[in-house]
């Protein structure tokens, strides 16, 4: 179902559609992170990806709770945006031979993913509140905070050791 499908008529439909979009995205991220962990060279980066894999599995669970609270079936819809981001990350990582440059590429790819999640959760939190679903907004906000914290960690990694070594 595309965003402009006629099946989306109300704010509630839009909320549920985007919930299904991020649910699909989070599951794809759970699938993609092990390869990034395996490829990362810097131990701090590797550990950071490990930690975020655990958080991401928990994001899936929180989303399932949001579906439950909202009385909707937890299911995903295809999200070509996240598929494209992950595909591009795999392409770029595949082409980089220098290990430290590879880390820089992995950080950039991970930040693409985090930024996508941050925009999605930002809208979802706002819409949940608008729909009077403070309970859902609260859970979505927790995911949002963890995405923001991960993005910050990646920025400081990018600015410190990893990129310096690559230069
Ligand atoms: Fe997430
Ligand atoms: Fe994330």
Image: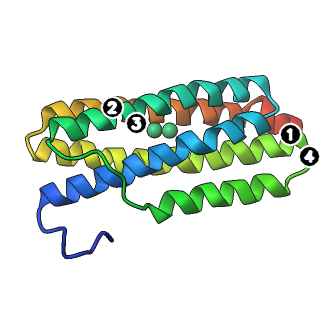
Mark 3 and mark 2 in contact (Cβ < 8 Å)?
yes
The crowding category of the residue bearing disc 3, from other C-alpha atoms within 10 Å (few below 14, some 14 to 19, many at least 20), is many
Q: CA distance from mark 2 to mark 4?
A: 38 Å
Q: Quick one: SS at disc 3?
A: helix
Residue sitting at 51 percent across and 57 percent down?
82
Mark 2 and mark 1 in contact (Cβ < 8 Å)?
no
| Label whose residue precedes the other's in the sequence (1 or 3) | 3
Q: Is residue 103 left or right of residue 65?
A: right
Find residue 147 and report its horizontal and vertical position in percent: 46, 35
Numbered label attached to residue 151: none
Q: CA distance from mark 1 to mark 3?
A: 31 Å
Q: Nearer the viewer, mark 1 or mark 2?
A: 2
Q: Is residue 130 above or below residue 159?
A: below
Q: Is residue 98 left or right of residue 88?
A: right
Q: Quick one: SS at disc 4?
A: loop
Q: CA distance from mark 2 to mark 3?
A: 6 Å
Front one among 73 and 94: 73
Task: Give the residue number, with chain letter if any, for mark 1.
Answer: 100
Quadrant in which the N terminus is drawn: bottom left
Mark 4 and mark 1 in contact (Cβ < 8 Å)?
yes
| Label whose residue precedes the other's in the sequence (3 or 4) | 3
Q: Is residue 164 left or right of residue 79?
A: right
Task: Give the residue number, with chain letter if any, for mark 2.
Answer: 62
Q: Is residue 145 left or right of residue 163?
A: left
Q: CA distance from mark 3 to mark 4?
A: 34 Å
Task: Give the residue number, with chain letter if any, for mark 4.
Answer: 98
The crowding category of the residue bearing disc 1, from other C-alpha atoms within 10 Å (few below 14, some 14 to 19, many at least 20), is many
| Label whose residue precedes the other's in the sequence (2 or 4) | 2
Q: Nearer the viewer, mark 3 or mark 4?
A: 3
Find residue 127 and report its horizontal and vertical position in percent: 19, 49
Task: Give the residue number, with chain letter if any, for mark 3.
Answer: 60
Find residue 166 and report its horizontal and vertical position in percent: 87, 41
């Amino acid at each position: 179902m595309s965003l402009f499908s006629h099946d989306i008529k109300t704010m509630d439909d839009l909320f549920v559609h985007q919930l299904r979009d991020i649910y699909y995205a989070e599951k794809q991220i759970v699938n993609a992170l092990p390869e990034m962990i395996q490829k990362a060279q810097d131990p701090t980066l590797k550990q950071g990806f490990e930690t975020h894999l655990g958080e991401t599995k928990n994001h899936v669970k929180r989303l399932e709770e949001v579906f439950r609270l909202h009385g909707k079936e937890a299911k995903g819809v295809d999200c070509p945006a996240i598929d494209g981001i992950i595909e591009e990350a795999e392409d770029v990582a595949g082409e980089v031979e220098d290990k430290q440059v590879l880390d820089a590429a992995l950080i950039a790819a991970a930040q693409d993913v985090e930024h996508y999640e941050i925009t999605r959760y930002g809208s979802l939190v706002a819409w949940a509140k608008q729909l009077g679903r403070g309970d859902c907004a609260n859970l979505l906000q927790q995911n949002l905070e963890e995405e923001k914290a991960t993005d910050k960690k990646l920025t400081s990694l990018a600015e410190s050791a990893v990129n310096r070594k690559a230069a």
